[in-house]
Amino acid sequence: MPLGEFGLIGRYFQRAVLQQAGDPAAVVLGIGDDAAVLQPGPDCQWVISTDSLVQGVHFPESHCPADLGYRALAVAVSDLAAMGATPQAFTLALTLPGVDEHWLQSFSDGLAQCAVDHRISLIGGDTTRGPLNIGISVFGEVPRGQALRRSGAQPGDLLCVGGPLGDGAAGLAVVLGQALPQGLGEQRDYLAARFWRPRAQCELGMALRGIATAAMDISDGLLQDAGHLARASAVALYLQADTLPGSTALQAWPPQQQREWKLRGGDDYVLLFTLPAEQHAAVDGWRQQGWPVTVIGRVEAGVGVWLDDQAVAGEGGYQHFKESADD
Ligand code: ADP
Ligand code: MG
C-alpha cells in the first residue's frame, strides 16, 4: 500500500535524529500536535527566518536528494549565523510531486546530517502534493539586544569576510557539469561539496556578538550583498580586490574568472561583517581557531561600494525579479 501523508511524516521526518539534533531544552513540544512549543533561554530573543528552494532556480534538476536536504537547511541556518543567533529549531514545508521512498529516505538523511552539524531540531512542518518545493523556517536565539544587524557599520571600521569567496559559483559550475579547467583533480569534490553542503558560520556569528558593528551572510555575491550592508548602515564600503580570499581549488581557473566569481558569484554563505578598528587583533584569534576571517576593506563616510577606489554598487549578483522596473 502506498504511504499516506501521515505515514510519510512519521517515517521520514518524525525521526529522533531530526527531532533531537539541537538543545532539547528549547523544544517543549515538537512534531505531532497542531503546533510546536518553544522555550527561549532566560533573557533571550527569538531570531526567525524563512527560505524557499525551487527546483530549477535554487538547485539543478539532477541532484542527489541527500545533498538537496543538506543544502536546503544549511542556507536557511546561514541567516541565523548572520544574525549571531544560536540555532534551535526549524520547520519544513515540503511540496512533493509524489511519494518516492528512495528520494524521501535520501532527502531525510541529508537533512538529518545538516541538522546534526548545526545542532538544530525539526519541530514541525507541512506536506503537500505539487511541483517540488522546499520551504524552511529557522528559529534561533540571541541574548536580549545582541542580534547582529546590517545597519551598525561606522566610518573607520574594518570590513571582513568569514571565509573564501567564489567557491559557490565554481561549485555550481562543477555540479552543472560545465567544462572544467585541467588540473582541478580532487578539488572537484571539494567544490561540489561547497555547493551542496555549505556549512553555515554559526560559531563565528555567535563570536561576533557584541563585537561586530554590522553583519550579514553573502548569498547573492559580494558586491550586491555589500551594497545592502552599505545602504542599511548609510556608509560607503571600500574593498581591495587583491585581499579577497579564495580557495586553492578556485586557482585552477584563470585570474579573471576567479575575480568575477569572488565579486559576483553567489552561494558562498560566508559572513560579511564590520569591526571597530581596535578589534583587529580578534581577527588573528579567529584564524587560529580555524575560522579563515580576512580583512577585505574599510568603512568610510559616504555611500555605495567601491572596489580599488572605483564605484561598483549594485552590479552583478543574483536577483529574482530583475527585469521589474522598481528593483
Ligand atoms: P495540521 O493538519 O494540523 O496542519 P498536519 O496534519 O499537516 O497538521 O501535520 C501533522 C503534524 O506533522 C504536525 O505536527 C506538523 O507540524 C507535522 N508535519 C507535517 N509535515 C511535516 C514535515 N514535512 N516535516 C516535519 N513535520 C511535519
Ligand atoms: Mg498542515
Image (cartoon, helix red, strand yellow):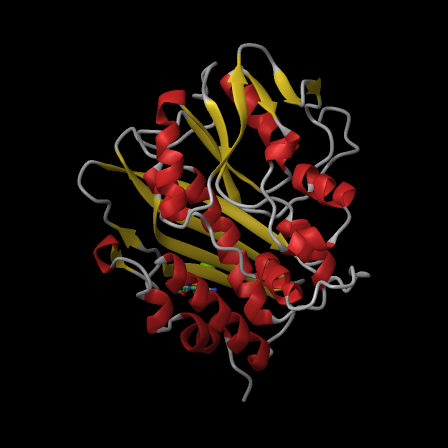
Q: Find residue 263 and report its horizontal and vertical position in percent.
A: 67, 36
Res. 32 visible in picture:
no
The residue nearer to you, when weighing 299 against 182, is 182
The N terminus sits in image quarter:
bottom right
Residue for point 58% across, 10% down: 302
Res. 256 visible in picture:
yes
Extreme residue toward the bottom, this view: 1
Extreme residue toward the right, this view: 179
Q: Find residue 320 and report its horizontal and vertical position in percent.
A: 70, 40
Quick check: which quadrant has ligand 1?
bottom left
Q: Is residue 139 left or right of residue 274?
A: left
The C terminus sits in image quarter:
top right
User: Is residue 264 placed above or below 35 in the rendered structure?
Assistant: above
Q: Is residue 92 left or right of residue 252?
A: left
The residue nearer to you, when weighing 72 against 268, is 268
Q: Is residue 57 left or right of residue 49?
A: right
Residue for point 60% across, 51% down: 247
Q: Find residue 89 and report its horizontal and vertical position in percent.
A: 35, 54
The residue nearer to you, when weighing 271 against 232, is 271
User: Is residue 102 placed above or below 18 in the rendered structure?
Assistant: below
Residue for point 71% across, 39% down: 259
User: Is residue 166 placed above or below 179 in the rendered structure?
Assistant: above
Extreme residue toward the left, this view: 42
User: Is residue 308 placed above or below 5 in the rendered structure?
Assistant: above
Q: Is residue 252 left or right of residue 115?
A: right
Quarter occupied by residue 125: bottom left
Quarter occupied by residue 175: bottom right
| Total marks placed | 0
The residue nearer to you, when weighing 309 against 62, is 309
Q: Find residue 189 and report its horizontal and vertical position in percent.
A: 62, 67
